[in-house]
Image: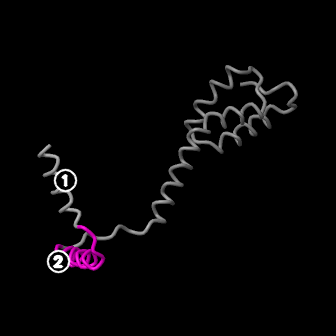
């Protein structure tokens, strides 16, 4: 890779390119070098940065999505432990009492009646 003609010091250009490359993972740099060479025989720092950003963009977005998902999961309360059979029996009894107080039909009974009605047709 040769420095552009408008750069007076090739060593300073290579140092600047190296500095740009240090901001990206090695896989990005490995993929960027052939692409930069294919696009220009006298690349600019702007081109080097643009190619690295283009290659790293999808990976960076995936990392950000994963981080957001992890943050969301951490913000959720921990799952409640399953009820013991005794606790479930108490809850069922409370539901049954409230249903009777409010004169609500028993959903199990309605399903049975519906099955009987459907079977006789």
Picture residue at 17% right of the left edge, 77% below the top: 86
Residue 88 placement: quadrant:
bottom left
Task: Sort mark 1 into few (<14), some (14-19) or many (20+) by Cα contacts within 10 Å.
Answer: few
Q: Residue 114: give its label.
A: 1
* Mark 2, residue position: 86
Q: Give coordinates of residue 55: x percent, y percent.
A: 61, 34
Q: Is residue 65 left or right of residue 94?
A: right
Q: Which residues are magenta?
A: 85-105
Please state the horizontal and vertical placement of residue 32, each as a whole percent of the image: 63, 30
Q: What secondary structure is marked by label 1?
A: helix
**Residue neighbourhood size for the residue with mark 2, other residues' Cα within 10 Å, grouped as few (<14), some (14–19), many (≥20):** few
- Distance from label 2 to label 1 (Cα)? 31 Å
- Work out whether 5 lies above or below 107: above
Predominant SS of the magenta segment: helix
In the rendered view, does 62 fall on the left or right side of 14? left
Q: Is residue 103 magenta?
A: yes
Residue lying at the far front in this picture: please name it. 121
Seen in the image, is 116 located left or right of residue 68?
Answer: left
Which sits in the foreground, 81 or 47?
81
User: Is 2 left, or right, of 57 in this rendering?
Assistant: right
108 to 55, vertically: above or below? below
Q: Position of residue 59 (x, y in %)?
A: 56, 40
Which secondary structure, mark 2? helix
Q: Residue at x 71, y 25 (%)?
A: 1
Foreground disc of the pair 2, 1? 1
């Amino acid at each position: 890779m040769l420095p552009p003609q408008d750069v007076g010091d090739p060593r300073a250009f290579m140092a600047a390119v190296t500095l740009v490359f240090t901001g990206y993972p090695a896989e990005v740099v490995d993929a960027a070098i052939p692409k930069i060479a294919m696009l220009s025989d006298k690349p600019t720092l702007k081109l080097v940065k643009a190619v690295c950003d283009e290659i790293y963009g999808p990976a960076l977005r995936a990392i950000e999505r994963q981080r957001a998902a992890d943050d969301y999961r951490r913000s959720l309360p921990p799952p409640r432990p399953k009820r013991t059979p005794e606790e479930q029996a108490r809850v069922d009894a409370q539901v049954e009492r409230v249903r009777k107080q409010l004169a609500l039909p028993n959903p199990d009974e309605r399903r049975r009646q519906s099955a009987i009605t459907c079977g006789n047709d």
